[in-house]
Amino acid sequence: MRKLALGLVIIGLLCSEVLADQVTMKNGDRLTGTIVKFDGEKLTMKSEFAGEVQIPWTAIEKATSDKAVYVTSKDGRVLIGTLTITERGIEVQTSQAGTVFLGKDAIQLIRSKDEQSAYEAELARQRLAMWSGSADAGLSATRGNSDTLLISLGTQAARATQRDKLSLYAAALFARNSTTGVSITTAEAIRGGARYDRDISKRLFGFGLTDLEHDKFQQLKLRLVLGGGLGYHARKTERMRLDLFGGGSYNREKFSTGLTRNSAEALFGEELSYKLSAVTSLSQRAVLFPNLSDFGKYRFAFDLTGVTKLTRQLGLQATISDRYQSNPLPGIKKNDLLLTTGIRWTFGSTKK
């Protein structure tokens, strides 16, 4: 029985060594454990007795991994599989592409499964940290001799890097009047959209956008605008940013009467943000859409928002939003002007 037990222990030790990752160095030393990562210069191994050991990449003669690792080459490819490192290069045994050979100098990174999971989690955290924006809410209500209700909601978010920016926005306004005893909706408008900007040079940038709009009292079921063009950073300082832009767009309007209008448009606009003080700021945007399918017709959109901070995240906001259309449906006024006020909650980075 003792011989059998001793034999099982020896077999277990041999099997554990066979199943572990192994590194043989040019001076003849050998290390057994788990490959953690390669950062471009040193290979990190974790062994049961020595802990984490960093081995210079140039000192490795041969290495093998028992468990799959993530291998990133300098041309951007990511291979997943067990690997064998020799003087000639690296062989990666993948489940889909079979055996892939890479030269030693072609390797940028190697990560274990745990290291890769931690890296991806950190990337996700950084992406989330890049987002910033705000949410607005306003409420006005009366009861008694007059019975009214007005609700305004809005949100805007942006993810900005050194070279590009993705912006999202949405706004809604609802108003009801029951003074006469009959509940009458007096306002129902929803707007939303997205825009992507990417710098071409220090001053020049390209952009693409999409806008969606619904307005019950314009009999507009849905307006869809797709557009893009070029812009110019006319001014960019700590307190002020001014962008000028122009391009073209496609406009599809569907009305509750059953009418659908499609048109090509040009677009010209400007966007301004300005800090009046440490706690008060203004943002303004104006865009003109000349109709290229029906010359002489046009749309104009104007938005102006002022915000005063109460705390780091809370503030008071007031917004003026104007939409003008030169060719509305018969019986519909050309201009719609909205004024909303309320609380603003800011999230993400508060730096502008």
Image (cartoon, helix red, strand yellow):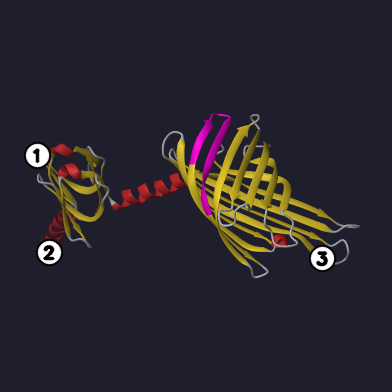
- Residue to which mark 1 is pinned: 26
Q: Earlier along the polypeptide chain: callout 1 or callout 2? A: 2
310 on left or right of 16: right
Per the image, is 232 magenta? yes
Label 3 or label 1, whichever comes before in sequence order: 1
Identify the mark at residue 183; answer none if there is no mark.
3
In the rendered image, the vertical position of residue 238 relative to residue 61, given as above or below? above
Tag 3 secondary structure: loop
Q: Which mark is residue 4?
A: 2
Give the image location of residue 312, x and y in percent: 62, 37
Residue 38: give x, y in percent of width and height: 24, 43
State yes or no: residue 89 in magenta.
Answer: no
The stretch in magenta equals 231-249
Q: Say which amino acid is labelled 1.
A: Lys
Disc 3 and disc 1 in contact, CB within 8 angstroms: no
Quadrant hosting residue 313: top right
State whether residue 335 appears in this view: yes
Res 92 quadrant in image: bottom left
Q: Who is closer to the viewer here, 153 or 312?
A: 153
Q: CA distance from mark 2 to mark 3?
A: 90 Å
